[in-house]
Image (cartoon, rainbow, N blue to C red):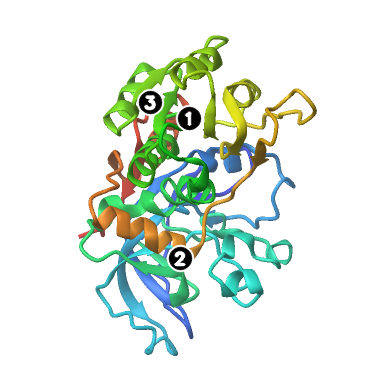
Amino acid sequence: MKAVRMVGWQSPPEIVELPVPEPGPGQVLVKIAGAGVCHSDLHVLDWPEGTLPYRLPFTLGHENSGWIAALGPGTEDARLREGDAVLVYGPWGCGVCPSCARGAENYCRRAAEIPAAGGGLGLDGGMAGYMLVPSPRLLVPIGGLEPRTAAPLSDAALTPYHAIKRSLHRLVPDSTAVVIGAGGLGHAAVQLLKALSPAQVIAVDIAPDKLKLAEQAGADHGIPPGEEAARRIRELSGGLGAALVLDCVGADATMATAAAAAAVESDIAVIGLAGGTLGVRFGAVPFEASVHIPYWGSRTELAEVAALAEAGLLDLHVETYPLGQAPEVYDRLRQGHINGRAVLIPETAT
């Protein structure tokens, strides 16, 4: 099978031929239908050796969907059957600590002992014909959803869902939520905010096509970034500011806008990995504003995201490409030419 592999730090990925893996005890083999191309991959590829504890090489792709191809010994009672359509839960923890036991493997208490974050992040992921998943607990059935385009639900939707869910108590009628960066995560965040809350939603992005996508996703307003962005947000919110700001970029400039646009007693969630900083001191953020950095989401939350999609409340914009075009797709992503989320489709996805 063809696989997109990370073979070196600060090096482009390579497409290689690998054998189809066989599931061992407790493992599940998933026939990949689609693998999302996430901006996080670019950070991993670009970071210098030693930044992450990952061992190279490994197959990229941490945002995956497909069909169960084979169940390894010991998985007979997992209530899964060959041919079932599933999402692969992305963060793989130890599976036994208190956080993992409640489904929050994104916050595994033993994560520092594991030299990988999951499939596609230190271990073989889904940018291949097949993917070996270490346990049935990491699979979420998706019912009647189309597996070839469902992959982004496992990150592009799950990550903002996790961030929004913890702040829903702030999103009362007449409140405002702001999404900075209307790309893969951002346009999903807009849909989730409209599905889960009565808040007015404002999207901020430098690209007119991404603002258009955000408005198609339900944003009430789309505005460009810059010095006037925070003033415009306050104007649109009746002078109060935003009860929740989701920064899907995470640069110095976007975090400064987030702080300037936030309301008193608000939440600022920094999801993007652009490496910016935000000084927290008296006067830098509004009174009782909370700044947090959420990471992915829980297995339970992924099931909730899938349920929203099955109910027709979440329909991500997906651009599909053959797996063999992965290098070109990464280049398009780096240049900002992907609208919504790109998904790679293996030749075997039939």
Q: Quadrant of residue 65?
A: bottom left
- Residue 2 can be seen in this image: no
Q: Nearer the viewer, residue 5 or 332?
A: 332
Q: Nearer the viewer, residue 212 or 230?
A: 230
Circle 2 SS class: helix
Q: Quadrant of residue 253?
A: top right
Measured Cα–Cα span from mark 3 to mark 2: 33 Å
Measured Cα–Cα span from mark 3 to mark 1: 23 Å
Amino acid type at image mark 1? Val
Judge whether 191 appears above or below 280 on screen.
below
Amino acid type at image mark 3? His
**Is there a contact, CB below 8 Å, between mark 3 and mark 2?**
no
Residue 257 point in image, percent of width and height: 59, 21
Amino acid type at image mark 2? Thr
Name the N-terminal-most of marks 1 and 2.
1
The mark found on residue 289 in the picture is none
User: Residue at 54% of width from left, 24% of height from top?
Assistant: 241
Circle 1 SS class: strand
User: Residue at 65% of width from left, 58% of height from top?
Assistant: 55
Residue 157 point in image, percent of width and height: 41, 48
Judge whether 289 appears above or below 234 on screen.
below
Measured Cα–Cα span from mark 1 to mark 2: 25 Å
| Residue ID for mark 3 | 337
Circle 3 SS class: loop
Name the N-terminal-most of marks 3 and 2.
2
The mark found on residue 300 in the picture is 2
Categorize mark 3 by other alpha carbons within 10 Å: few (<14), some (14-19), many (20+): some
User: Residue at 66% of width from left, 74% of height from top?
Assistant: 97
